[in-house]
Each structure stands twice: as structure tokens, then as C-alpha cells.
Amino acid sequence: MVDLTVQFAFDSATILDESKPLLERLARALNSAQLSNLRFVIEGHTDGVGNKPYNDQLSARRAQSVVDFLAAAGVSPARLRSQGKGFSELLYPQDPRAAGNRRVRIKVGV
């Protein structure tokens, strides 16, 4: 599993331009011979600010944005599944506001 810091517009699922090269490299890796037969779950995570229902929905939209980006970059959408986790799995639970909690996690899926 890999945690990526993908930048989004504030309160939005729009991927910022500075994160696109990272996602382009990810797409190339997912299409490499070593990974081309695997499926992946793209998890969206938020920080601990705000209410649970809103963060659950925002994280799901952000995960789907990454799936859409990867599909547009040539990764078969059949190999990708998005899932929003909200703030249920903070990377830094001792600091719920930490920017590192706002991330996308890529996991090998089934």
C-alpha cells in the first residue's frame, strides 16, 4: 500500500496541477509489466476537521477523481475501485488537523 499526498482545490475534488505529474507516474507504474494484472483500491482520506458525513462524501469524491485521472491516463477502470474513508483512519491521530491526514491511499485490491 502507498500513501500519496494529492493536492485538491479547497473543499473540492478537483485535483490541482501540481499533483498531476505524481499521478501520471503512478499511472505508468500501474501499467508496468509487474503490476498490469493487479487491481487496486483508491482510498480517499480527510483530516479530522468538520463533520463525519461531509468528510465521508468529500473523501469519496476525491478518490473517484483520482480513479478518473488514472483511467484517462490509460489505466483500465476495471482495475480500479474508489472508496471514501473520511477521517476514520487518520495517519496522525494525535494531530487531526495535520495536512498528512489528507491523502489518497493506493492498495492492492481484489
Image: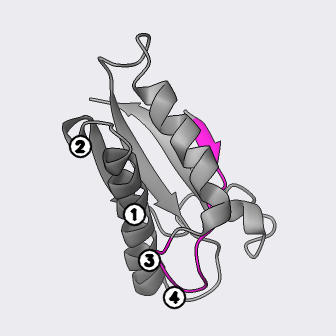
Q: Amino acid at mark 2?
A: Pro
Give the residues drawn in magenta, as a range. Answer: 2-14
Give the alpha-carbon distance from disc 3 to disc 4, as whole Å. 11 Å
Q: At x 62% / y 48%, what residue is drawn?
A: 21
Above or below 94: residue 56: below
Check whether the beta carbons of the residues at disc 4 and disc 2 lie within 8 A of each other. no
Mark toward the start of the polypeptide (3 vs 1): 3
Task: Name the element at disc 3.
Answer: helix
Mark 3: amino acid? Leu
- The residue closer to the viewer here, 39 or 52, is 39
Q: Is residue 5 magenta?
A: yes
Question: In this figure, which residue is indicated by the disc labeled 1?
Answer: 65
The residue that disc 2 covers is 77
User: Tag 4 or tag 3, which sits nearer the N-term?
Assistant: 4
Q: Amino acid at mark 4?
A: Asn
As measured in the structure, the alpha-carbon distance from the residue carrying label 1 to the one carrying label 4 is 21 Å
Which tag, 1 or 2, sits closer to the chain's start? 1
N-term mark: 3 or 2: 3
Disc 3 vs disc 2: Cβ atoms closer than 8 Å?
Answer: no
Label 3 belongs to which residue? 58
* Residue 90 visible (yes or no): no
Dominant SS type (magenta): loop
Q: Find disc 4 in the rendering and name its residue.
A: 51
